[in-house]
Image: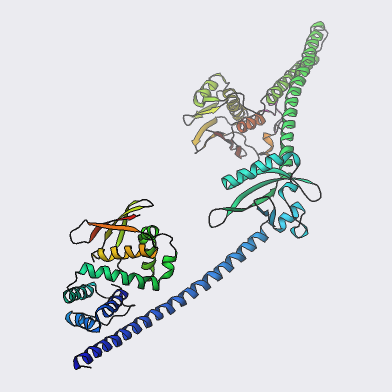
Amino acid sequence: MSVHEIEILKRALAREKLARKTAEDILETKSAELYELNLQNKQANEKLASLIKVKNSELKGFFENIIDAYIMMDLSGNVLKMNKAAEALLGYKLSEGILNLQSLTQEKDSDLVSASFQTLLQNGKITNFEVNLITQNNILKLVSINSSVIYDEHQKAIATHGILRDITQIKQLENQKEQLLHELEKSNENLQEYAHVVSHDLKSPLRSIDALVAWIQEDNKEHLKESSLAHFQLIEKTLEKMENLITKVLSYSSLGANMQRTENVDVDALLHRLLKVMYVPKHVQIQVLNTLPSLTGDEVKLEQLFQNLIGNAIKFNDKTQGIVKIAVVDKRDFYEFSVSDNGIGIEEKYFDTVFKIFNSLQKRKDSSGIGLSMVKKIVELHQGTIWIESELQKGTTFNFTLKK
Amino acid sequence: MKGIIFTEFLELVEEKFGLMMVDDIIEKSNLVSGGAYTAVGIYEFSEMLQLLQNLSKNTKLTIDDLLLVFSEHLFKALIKSHPNLVAHYKDPMNLLASIENHIHVEVQKLYPDAQLPTFEMVEKTPTKMVMIYKSDKALYVLGKGLMEETFKLFKVKGEITYRKIKEDGTEVEFTIIKS
């Protein structure tokens, strides 16, 4: 072998050695990288595994502890899973045999049920589907079902699950409520009619008595003593008061539970019209402190409302200079009105009773005991409330709200 | 450039022209690596260019002819080290059509720093494909050789022609016809 050849071989060998060394270094680094990566993977896997464990236990807890019945079904309607609440609701246990949607539903509901099952599969969910289910001991239970489809990782439907809520009692209560409301409406109507008839019927004998008394007086004009004539006058006044009372009862009963007319009422104009026709004694001064607003309501009833309150303020005023103030404050959804006087005042213990029918605190011939109960009814018809502030001898304020 | 290209190239040179030729082209080139290549390493493309130029000078063969011969050898080596990549395909057309979207994707995963040419599909029928090769290495002749080897592997006859879009060969249109 020539020196030249030996040189070539030596160089080739040196290159091979160097290449091997480089390769070894590269592989060493790579394997260290791989080891590191593997370690990271392991840690990530452990983390995932523990996360899955936590999620599983969360789900299990959720599944077992929700109060509502939970059911999982396959796509043919076979029940795969149910929680304790579902077992209690339906009376079945999966450990005791297979359970299918068909066996839970009535024959007559089968079309409805399969249609909703199709909707569920198509839309992925159904909400508030109400259907009667037959329990194991043959009792019908009305349930409301909220259900959704479970998909696999390729978005293929694999099962359905849902929450069943027993609404049998709720439905019964709802029906009862409706029935009661209907009955109440009817009895209200009857009552109104009754009050109407009664007051008419009561008035006609009163008129007869009035006429008869007048005839007796007329016939015996010369024979009657002064005191008897005075008694006859008292009878006439009493009759008049009675008739007045009956008229008020009639108007109270015909107020009804609903507003007959709702329109935009200019309360300011209404009040000034009213003050022109009302009798206001000379010693009483009426002050309207603001311009009153317009609101939606029943004009006739609103007039009755102010007439009664202002009338009371005048009636129960014992001061030499009586003052009645009317004011309003604009509150967000409603107006707060006040009618205040410097009259005799009301004791706090009577604040509630004054609004009750026939509860006049003073036996006065011009007080029927109906006015304030009518006022309260009118305020409530306008979705408002009424309350009293008062101090004996100093005066009374009636505050009330009316919805805008 | 991947070390396997260098090791396979030098192996071929040794096989065809002897160890002396290998030593000579390495000594005549100015190589950072010193000519000590390993398949798992990565080396400058300029080293391959110098080796090719010196080999061409010594053998009086054109670089393109050398590349064609090399492609035959390289193909066999590639198939040997990655047999499952090819087992996937039943037809050379399918394999060639998948270079960009499958084979190179896998290669990139394996060697994140690999600089791969791109093959943009312009036309594709079961019997004809037109692809645009793009690479700053301008090794389109090597590409053509590898394509021809693919047809040979599947024992299917085909014709591969090319047209340079850029004069320096960094962008070349390949037309592949299966007959």
Q: Is A136 displayed left or right of B104 in the figure?
A: right
Q: Is residue A368 magenta?
A: yes
Say if residue B112 shows up in the picture. Answer: no
Looking at the image, is A304 positioned above or below residue B131?
Answer: above
Residue drawn at (24%, 72%), measured in percent from left and top? B45
Q: Is A210 displayed left or right of A120 in the figure?
A: right
Q: Is residue A77 magenta?
A: no
Please state which of residues A322 and A5 is positioned toward the viewer in this rendering.
A5
Looking at the image, is B51 positioned above or below residue A229?
Answer: below
The percent coordinates of residue A240 (x first, y second) are 73, 18
The percent coordinates of residue A256 (x first, y second) are 67, 26
Say if residue B102 shows up in the picture. Answer: yes
Please state which of residues A338 and A249 is positioned toward the viewer in this rendering.
A249
Quarter holding the N terminus of chain A is bottom left
Residue drawn at (66%, 25%), measured in percent from left and top? A255
Question: What secondary structure prevails in the magenta region?
Answer: loop
The percent coordinates of residue A321 (x first, y second) are 55, 30
Start-end of magenta stretch: A361-370
The percent coordinates of residue A28 (x first, y second) are 38, 83
Q: Is B19 displayed left or right of B129 in the figure?
A: left
Please state which of residues B3 and A77 is positioned toward the viewer in this rendering.
B3
Residue drawn at (32%, 86%), measured in percent from left and top? A21
Looking at the image, is A69 positioned above or below residue A292?
Answer: below
